[in-house]
């Protein structure tokens, strides 16, 4: 059995879709079905076409783990993709509990029960990139995230290294993922998705003004990654359980906003 936290979310639902394609339906979805970023409760729509065994609220699932759920149901892998992913979240306690404490609890449960643990870190941990984008774990302490979300993810990466569990788990630093099932993310949707709707509705795409004199407007660079490619990379770590540590999930090539928006038109 496979568990996907954040399974009704963007990457999580795409991961379950791909697992279904591979013939896997013995899947437990874990998520939080409160209001989405746009004030609606619409993530459930991502589950309509998927095949899975059960769905649990994330808090209920946390309690179930303490009762031997992982061992009793012979869980093979947990993909922990659930998180508070708002880069504008002001309440750090919310980020701390969701992105650090909950992740740490799941990790410890997996290690104790010999369950494969693959978790989502974030490219936001790299900050402004002045330390480069190497996923060398020995350099984790040099990174300086620019927002509270990035730091809450960075906290777990640091804990995992200090606790010496990185040789047993896999952490994935997703870059700028785009694709289907983003609609519930509101302001946190990818630039690609936002521009698509802008072009469709107005015939124009609005890009961020550059705040760096080294880059002209629209010439800022990002590593954009299609969600189905991100999913295939994620599944690699279930299929290859001896591959552990922290890995950057991207194309390895940065494109300008100007170059990337042209195919959207």
Image (cartoon, helix red, strand yellow):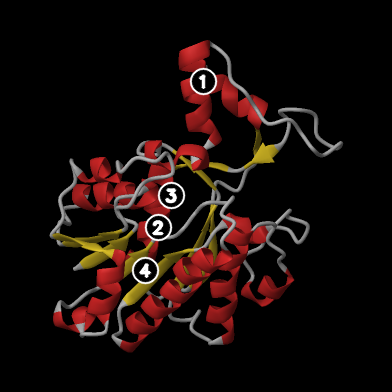
Camera-near label (1 vs 4) is 1
Q: Earlier in the sequence, mark 4 or mark 2?
A: 2
Q: CA distance from mark 2 to mark 3?
A: 6 Å
**Percent position (x, y) of residue 159?**
56, 80
Q: Residue at x 22, y 74 (%)?
A: 75
Asked if marks 4 and 2 touch (Cβ < 8 Å), the reply is no
Q: Quadrant of residue 246?
A: bottom right
Q: CA distance from mark 1 to mark 4?
A: 41 Å
Query: Mark 2 falls on what kind of element?
Result: helix
* Residue designated by label 1: 198
Q: Quadrant of residue 261?
A: top right
Disc 4 crowd rating (10 Å Cα; few below 14, some 14-19, many 20+) is: few
Q: Earlier in the sequence, mark 4 or mark 3?
A: 3
* Residue designated by label 2: 234
**Percent position (x, y) of residue 12?**
34, 52
Query: Mark 1 falls on what kind of element?
Result: helix
Q: CA distance from mark 3 to mark 1?
A: 25 Å
Q: Earlier in the sequence, mark 1 or mark 4?
A: 1
């Amino acid at each position: 059995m496979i568990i996907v936290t954040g399974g009704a979310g963007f990457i999580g639902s795409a991961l379950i879709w791909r697992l279904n394609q591979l013939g896997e339906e013995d899947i437990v979805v874990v998520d939080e079905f409160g209001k989405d970023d746009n004030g609606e409760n619409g993530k459930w729509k991502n589950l309509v076409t998927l095949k899975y065994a059960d769905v649990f609220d994330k808090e209920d699932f946390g309690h179930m783990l303490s009762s031997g759920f992982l061992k009793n149901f012979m869980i093979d892998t947990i993909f922990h993709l659930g998180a508070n992913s708002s880069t504008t979240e002001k309440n750090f306690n919310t980020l701390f509990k969701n992105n650090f404490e909950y992740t740490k609890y799941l990790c410890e449960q997996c290690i104790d029960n010999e369950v494969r643990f693959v978790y989502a870190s974030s490219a936001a941990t790299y900050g402004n990139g002045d330390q480069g984008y190497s996923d060398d774990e020995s350099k984790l302490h040099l990174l300086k995230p620019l927002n509270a979300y990035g730091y809450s993810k960075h906290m777990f990466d640091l804990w995992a290294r200090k606790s010496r569990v990185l040789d047993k788990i896999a952490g994935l630093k997703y870059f700028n993922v785009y694709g289907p099932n983003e609609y519930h993310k509101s302001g946190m949707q990818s630039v690609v998705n936002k521009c698509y709707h802008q072009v469709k509705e107005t015939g124009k795409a609005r890009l961020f003004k550059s705040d760096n004199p080294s880059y002209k407007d629209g010439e800022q660079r990002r590593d954009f990654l299609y969600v189905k490619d991100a999913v295939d990379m994620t599944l690699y770590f279930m299929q290859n359980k001896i591959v552990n540590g922290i890995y950057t999930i991207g194309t390895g090539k940065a494109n300008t906003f100007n170059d990337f928006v042209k195919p959207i038109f």
